[in-house]
Image (cartoon, grey):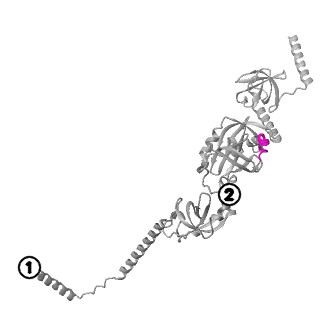
C-alpha cells in the first residue's frame, strides 16, 4: 500500500511538474481550444487536447455547415469552444457551432474589408430578394444586387411570377461580396452583381458611347427590352429609345429571341444603356415639310388620357390634342367620349420638330356622348346635322304644342247643369226618331 501511495504520489508530482513545465491552463467555458480528432461520427466527435484532456462534441453542437467541420477524420486538427468544463464523464464538453460562428464572422469581416468574395446558400425568398446563409449567419441579397443572368425580368411586372423566379434559387449557392456588415444589428447585405461586374470590368471597358452592338432580346418588360450581346454582356433599351414614335408597350413590337441592333448611349458601372431608334433616321426632321400649322389632318386616337388624346397622324408622327382643344362641355368626361381607334379631323396648332412635339385641336368638337360626327367622312357629318335639325324641329313642335293650351272650362251654375242635362236627353230622343224614320 505504501508503495502504491509512493507511485500515485509520484505520478501526481509528475503531472503537476508537467502542468508547471508547460504552463498548461485548464480550459474554461467560452475558451477556444485546438485538438486532434480521435474519432468522428454523425453522433459525436472526440478530440485529444494536448495529450492531457479529452473533449467531446455532440448533438446540436456538431457544426457541419462549415466545410472544415464536415467529413472530419482521425488525425485532423480542429478548433472547438468549451461550453462545459466537465460533463458526466469528466470530459470537456465542446462545441463546433460557437467556434465555427466566430470563424465565420472573422471571414466576413475580412471579406468586407478586402472586397473578397464568399459563397452563400439561398434558404428562402421574398418579394424584395433572397434570404441567404453563410455558415450559420444569415444575410440578405436584394433583387437589385443580383447578377444579370439571375435578375427576375417578368413581362408586366407580375409580382407573383417574380417571387416564383426568386424561389427557384432556393438551395443554390451564389458567389457574393459583402456590401453591409453590422454585427450589432446582426445585419448583412450581400451583392452578386458586384462579383459579376468585377469579372466583366475588362469586357465592359471595351464598350464606349457610340459603339454599335447586335444582340438577341433576352427579356421584354413594360419599361423596355434587355438584349444579350458580346461576351456574356447585357444591356437595356428603354422604351423611349426603341422607336421614334410613341410606344404603349414594348411587347407590341418585340418578343424574346428577336435580333436587334443598338447603339451604346451610356455606361454606368456594370450597366449599359442602348438605343435602337438612333440607328434610324429621325422622321421629325422632315415633319416641317409634311405638316404645317393651321393644316387640317385626319388622325387616329391611340390613347385616351385625362389630360388629352394621343393621336397618330402617320406611322411615325404622333401628336397630342389637349383636353382644352376638344370642345368639351361642362362635366363631360373625356374617357366617356373617346376611345382608342376612333378617327377624327384635327387642326395642327403647334409644331416643334426638334422637341418631337405636335399640338392638335379637334375640328368638330364633341357636344354629346356620341362620336358619330367626329370620325371623319362627309356623310356622317351630314347625318349628324340632319339628326340635330330633326331634334331641333321636334323640340320646337313640343314648345308650340305646350303654348296652345285648351281654354279653361267655365264653371256652370246648378240650374245650367240641369238644363244641360235636359237638353242632352231631348237631343238623344231626336236622334232616335230620325233613325226610325230612316228605317
Q: For residue 413, which quarter of the picture?
A: bottom left
At 16% from the left and 86% from the top, the residue drawn is: 423
Left or right of 166 on screen, residue 391: left
Who's the residue at 14% across and 81% down the image?
428
Q: In the picture, which quadrant includes the N terminus? A: top right
Q: Nearer the viewer, residue 127 or 79?
A: 127
Q: Is residue 269 above or below residue 80?
A: below
Chain part drawn in magenta: 198-207
The residue depicted at 20 percent of the width and 89 percent of the height is 415
Q: Is residue 206 magenta?
A: yes
Residue 150, quarter of the rendered image: top right
Examine the rendered structure and indicate whether residue 323 appears above or below residue 316. below
Q: Which SS type dominates the magenta stretch?
A: helix
**Of callouts 1 and 2, which one flags the residue occurring earlier in the amino acid sequence?**
2
Residue extending farthest to the front is: 289
**Distance CA(mark 1)–CA(mark 2):** 100 Å
Q: Which mark is residue 282?
A: 2
Amino acid at each position: 500500500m505504501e508503495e502504491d501511495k509512493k507511485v500515485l504520489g509520484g505520478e501526481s508530482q509528475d503531472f503537476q511538474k508537467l502542468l508547471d513545465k508547460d504552463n498548461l491552463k485548464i480550459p474554461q467555458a467560452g475558451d477556444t481550444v485546438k485538438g486532434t480528432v480521435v474519432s468522428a461520427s454523425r453522433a459525436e466527435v472526440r478530440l485529444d487536447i494536448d495529450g492531457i484532456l479529452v473533449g467531446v462534441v455532440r448533438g446540436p453542437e456538431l457544426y457541419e455547415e462549415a466545410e472544415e467541420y464536415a467529413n472530419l477524420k482521425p488525425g485532423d486538427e480542429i478548433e472547438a469552444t468549451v461550453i462545459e468544463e466537465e460533463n458526466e464523464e469528466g470530459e470537456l464538453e465542446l462545441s463546433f457551432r460557437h467556434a465555427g460562428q466566430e470563424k465565420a464572422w472573422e471571414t466576413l469581416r475580412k471579406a468586407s474589408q478586402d472586397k473578397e468574395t464568399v459563397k452563400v446558400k439561398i434558404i428562402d425568398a421574398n418579394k424584395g430578394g433572397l434570404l441567404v446563409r453563410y455558415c450559420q449567419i444569415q444575410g440578405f441579397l436584394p433583387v437589385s444586387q443580383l447578377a444579370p443572368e439571375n435578375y427576375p425580368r417578368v413581362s408586366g411586372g407580375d409580382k407573383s411570377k417574380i417571387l416564383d423566379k426568386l424561389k427557384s434559387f432556393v438551395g443554390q449557392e451564389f458567389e457574393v461580396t459583402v456590401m453591409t456588415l453590422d454585427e450589432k444589428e446582426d445585419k448583412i447585405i450581400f451583392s452578386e452583381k458586384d462579383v459579376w461586374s468585377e469579372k466583366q470590368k475588362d469586357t465592359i471597358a471595351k464598350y464606349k458611347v457610340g459603339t454599335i452592338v447586335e444582340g438577341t432580346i433576352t427579356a421584354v418588360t413594360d419599361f423596355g427590352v434587355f438584349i444579350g450581346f458580346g461576351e456574356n454582356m447585357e444591356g437595356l433599351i428603354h422604351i423611349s429609345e426603341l422607336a421614334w414614335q410613341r410606344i404603349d408597350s414594348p411587347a407590341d413590337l418585340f418578343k424574346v429571341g428577336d435580333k436587334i441592333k443598338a447603339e451604346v448611349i451610356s455606361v454606368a458601372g456594370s450597366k449599359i444603356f442602348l438605343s435602337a431608334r438612333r440607328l434610324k433616321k429621325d422622321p421629325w426632321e422632315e415633319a416641317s415639310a409634311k405638316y404645317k400649322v393651321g393644316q387640317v389632318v385626319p388622325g387616329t386616337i391611340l390613347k385616351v388620357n385625362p389630360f388629352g388624346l394621343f393621336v397618330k397622324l402617320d406611322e411615325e408622327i404622333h401628336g397630342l390634342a389637349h383636353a382644352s382643344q376638344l370642345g368639351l362641355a361642362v362635366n363631360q368626361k373625356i374617357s366617356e367620349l373617346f376611345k382608342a381607334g376612333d378617327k377624327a379631323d384635327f387642326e395642327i396648332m403647334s409644331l416643334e420638330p426638334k422637341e418631337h412635339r405636335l399640338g392638335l385641336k379637334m375640328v368638330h368638337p364633341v357636344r354629346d356622348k356620341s362620336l358619330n360626327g367626329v370620325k371623319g367622312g362627309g356623310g356622317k357629318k351630314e347625318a349628324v346635322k340632319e339628326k340635330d335639325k330633326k331634334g331641333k324641329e321636334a323640340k320646337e313642335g313640343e314648345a308650340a304644342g305646350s303654348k296652345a293650351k285648351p281654354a279653361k272650362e267655365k264653371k256652370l251654375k246648378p240650374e245650367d247643369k240641369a238644363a244641360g242635362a235636359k237638353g242632352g236627353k231631348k237631343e238623344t230622343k231626336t236622334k232616335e226618331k230620325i233613325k226610325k224614320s230612316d228605317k
